[in-house]
Image (cartoon, rainbow, N blue to C red):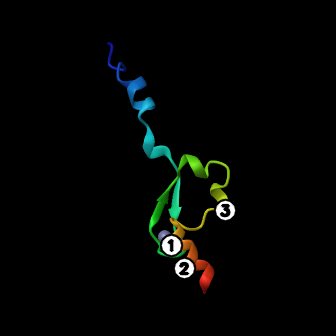
Amino acid sequence: MGDKSGAKRDFAGNKSFLPSKPCVACGRPMTWRKKWEKNWEQVKYCSDACRKKGDAR
Ligand SMILES: [Zn+2]
């Protein structure tokens, strides 16, 4: 008995649940950030440098 004592701690530190997707410019995986909370679906580039690269064509 008492074998579930660690369950709550696991839930609190469950950062691996955050979504991620590859940057369209460099292909590196981007992990979800708080600042992308409202436009995550529109985020395509991991950084300003990649966005310039992508926009320049
Ligand atoms: Zn990138």
**Up-down relation of residue 11 to residue 16 (above or below):** above
| Residue ID at (67%, 55%) | 39
Q: Quadrant of residue 7?
A: top left
Q: Nearer the viewer, residue 12 or 36?
A: 36
| Disc 1 element | helix
Q: CA distance from mark 3 to mark 1?
A: 17 Å
- Can you give x and y, in whole percent of width and height, for residue 37 in the image? 62, 48
| Disc 2 element | helix
Question: Residue beneath label 2, please?
Answer: 53
Position of 11 compared to 55: left or right? Answer: left
- Ligand 1 within 8 A of label 2's CB? yes
| Residue ID at (43%, 45%) | 16
- Can you give x and y, in whole percent of width and height, for residue 4 in the image? 37, 20
Residues under numbered marks 2 and 1 in contact, where contact means CB atoms less than 8 Å apart? yes
Mark found first going from the N terminus, 3 or 1: 3
**Up-down relation of residue 27 to residue 37 (above or below):** below
| Residue ID at (58%, 49%) | 35
Question: Residue beneath label 3, please?
Answer: 42
Question: Residue beneath label 1, please?
Answer: 49
Q: CA distance from mark 2 to mark 3?
A: 17 Å
**Up-down relation of residue 5 to residue 27 (above or below):** above
